[in-house]
Amino acid sequence: MPKFESILPRVIAAAVPALLIALVLAPLTSAAQVVTITNPWVRGTVAEQKVTGAFMTLTAPGESRLVEVRSPVAGTVEIHEMKMDGNVMRMRPIQALVLPPGKPVELRPGGYHVMLMDLKKPLNAGDIVPLTLTVEGPDSKRHTVNVDVPVRALNAAAGASAQPAKEHKH
Ligand SMILES: [Cu+2]
């Protein structure tokens, strides 16, 4: 059955992303369509390090804004952008991150990111960091989405493979 064998890997390759999306969306109620979070991760820290970044891709079906992020592991959480200041690239906090309808917005090292500050303990690879995202939807209502984010090693590559997110809504 050479025909069957040749098509099977492609069927699996097509099914796996769909399965991951299903895992992300499964626990959500209908109101949770406000944002989809894919490939979330937090960069691990060393002892005494008080600051790190959280990264993910956010996709909102309707024009939305990420307005707040909170986490029990950090005293302060900010949404940061990278901006050129003369010849130097610097990060600075922004009030809100605009999520254009249907367009994935990538939070990544060197770009937009969630800054976890005043960390209460070191974050090691394999730890789970709960984040609560507040997103203002097209209806201007605020929705919170909780996501459990895995910690990757301090030297983890920015483009490491996707992991399913565990989300639930309040
Ligand atoms: Cu930052």
Image (cartoon, rainbow, N blue to C red):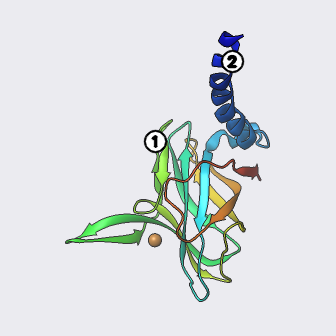
| x and y, in percent, of residue 124 in the image | 67, 74
Residue with the most extreme right position: 27
Foreground label between 1 and 2: 2
Q: Is residue 86 left or right of residue 67?
A: left
What residue lies at 68% left-to-right and 27% top-to-bottom? Answer: 12
Callout 1: SS: loop
Q: Nearer the viewer, residue 150 or 73?
A: 150
Q: In the picture, which quadrant includes the N terminus? A: top right
| x and y, in percent, of residue 162 in the image | 61, 48
What residue lies at 71% left-to-right and 73% top-to-bottom? Answer: 72
Is tag 1's residue or tag 2's residue first in the polypeptide sequence?
2
Task: Name the amino acid, label 1.
Answer: Pro
Q: Say if disc 1 is inside 8 Å of ligand 1.
A: no
Is residue 166 placed above or below 29 in the rendered structure?
below
The residue that disc 1 covers is: 100
Q: Nearer the viewer, residue 12 or 163?
A: 12
Is residue 128 placed above or below 12 in the rendered structure?
below
Q: Is residue 76 left or right of residue 159?
A: right
Q: Which mark is residue 5?
A: 2
| x and y, in percent, of residue 97 in the image | 47, 55
